[in-house]
Amino acid sequence: MTTKQNAKLMIMAAALSAAVTANALAQGVGNLPALPTSFPINGNSWWVTDPAGGPLPVVRDPNGPAWIKKFYDPNGAIQPTPGQIFPVFEKLLIAPPLDWSDWHEQILTPGWDWGPVVYMFEGQWQQQPPAGLVVINTPGTPTQGGTLDFYFNPLPPGTQLDIRKYLVYTGPQGQTFPYIEIAQYPTPEPASMGLLAAGAALTLRRRRHGRTA
């Protein structure tokens, strides 16, 4: 490996490490006051749309907070049975001025996970996945629910995203919930960026070791 290649890899690792630090508190929503935060169940499903069923515009702001949503049943507390599935349909519009290359959904309520079937479509009529789409579905822990991470090629403002997924109750029988709380945001997830930085640094060490061996 040449000195020039080593230098490039070192710069990449340093840049990724700096990005982790810069985004440590970034949660990404810049128009939170204009967005709804409570969503009533419709049949056995939740719909995250505007009142007419259209997309909700979301502004990406690296210094903004997370969008905390509460899914509830207006007829009373949610009383799920173990393994019960609730469809969730979501329509979002990438609002100016920044593009998106990711979207994150963290269930804050313990005992709930995202089902294995997850779809993201780009455009109102095309109904095709965004180019480069990767979906990471991470199960929950005893203290919080599961996480969905979507990564894709940059999409410009004006792009509509149609997300279809399922909430699955994984807790014990007899539990009741006034609502299910979920945090959502676009912007890089610090943990994932940290893994990239660590990977770059590890590659550099391995290549150096191979050169001197």
Image (cartoon, grey):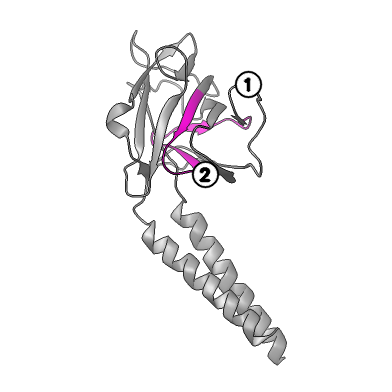
SS type, badge 1? loop
Residue on which the image places disc 1:
125
Q: x%, y% of residue 152?
A: 60, 44
Is residue 27 inside the magenta stretch?
A: no
Task: Name the amino acid type tagged 2.
Answer: Asp
Looking at the image, how many numbered discs can be counted on the residues?
A: 2
Residue 99 in sight from this viewpoint? yes
Q: x%, y% of residue 135?
A: 60, 41
Picture residue at 36% right of the left edge, 29% below the top = 69
Residue 39 lies in quadrant: top left
Pick whichever, 195 or 173, lies toward us: 195
Q: x%, y% of residue 109?
A: 39, 33
Residue 151 in sight from this viewpoint? no
Residue on which the image places disc 2:
102
SS type, badge 2? strand
Judged by depth in the image, the label closer to the viewer, 2 or 1, is: 1
Instruction: Give the Cα distance between marks 2 and 1.
Output: 21 Å
List the single residue furthest toward the left.
33
Q: Quadrant of the N terminus?
A: bottom right
Picture residue at 41% right of the left edge, 29% below the top = 57
Q: Is residue 152 left or right of residue 186?
A: right
Q: Which residues are magenta?
A: 90-118
Task: Name the amino acid type tagged 1.
Answer: Trp
